[in-house]
Image (cartoon, grey):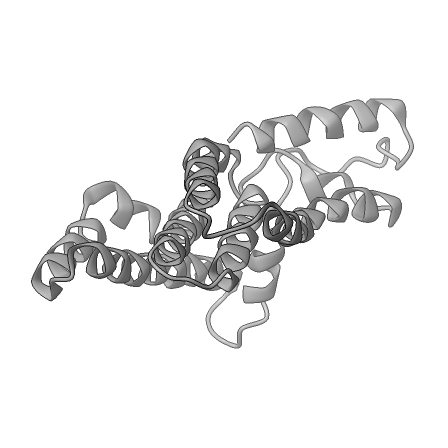
Amino acid sequence: MLLGKTFTYLPVGDVGYRLNLMAAVFAAGAVTVFFQLILLVAKRTTTSFAVACSLAFSYYFWASAVVAEAYTLHVFLTGLTIHLLVKWDKSQGNRLLFAALLAWGLSFGNHMSTMLKGPAVAFLILRGLQQNRISAATILLAVPALVLSLTLYLYLPWRYSADALPYVISHSDSFGLGPSRPHDDRWHVGDPNLIAIRVIDIRLQVGK
């Protein structure tokens, strides 16, 4: 929603065009990240190029890249998290681990299926502990990077306290483009019915 709002300020096309452009930008970013990831693992440019093209021109990925939805951003953040983790696993520094946890935390604000990466993240960190490449103190220092990115969820109570209109978090689309119900003067901030609807809407958005 926040990224979508940022893209609406671009001086090109209408709002729908700008948000579709955002999906295409993150799709291109996802393809680039996966190219770098495969190059890091396979160390062959031709293999990396083939994999990246397979992703870019696949039917479902292409379909997601031309509509204002959460999926291309999800693929981008997933690929970025995995790339940073693999690169950290092959290196000696810990900055990449901090960056990976930051990217992972940011992906929670876009699609909750990102929690499925939890076992892989835990495995790599535990293996780093076993190999003495990372200490428990370093892990504690890395936790704020994850927590910092999760503070995006503070936007919901802040927006609610700002007397936001009902459609701000209504069940419409992933970027909150518009209401799924017409505005009605009967709905007022603080109305118990509206609060209940907002809770349901948040659960629907989280469940996507």
Residue drawn at (53%, 61%) of the image: 15
> Camera-side residue: 138 or 178?
138
Residue drawn at (55%, 27%) of the image: 207
User: Is residue 164 shown to the viewer in this render?
Assistant: no
Q: Residue furthest left?
A: 46
Residue drawn at (39%, 53%) of the image: 76
* Residue 121 coordinates in the image, percent (x, y): 45, 40
User: Is residue 190 shown to the viewer in this render?
Assistant: yes
> Camera-side residue: 144 or 206?
144
Q: Is residue 47 above or below residue 105?
A: below
Quarter of the figure with residue 92: bottom left
* Residue 96 coordinates in the image, percent (x, y): 47, 61
Q: Is residue 75 above or below residue 6?
A: above
> Camera-side residue: 86 or 30?
86
* Residue 158 coordinates in the image, percent (x, y): 82, 48
Quarter of the figure with residue 26: bottom left
Q: Is residue 157 above or below residue 192?
A: below
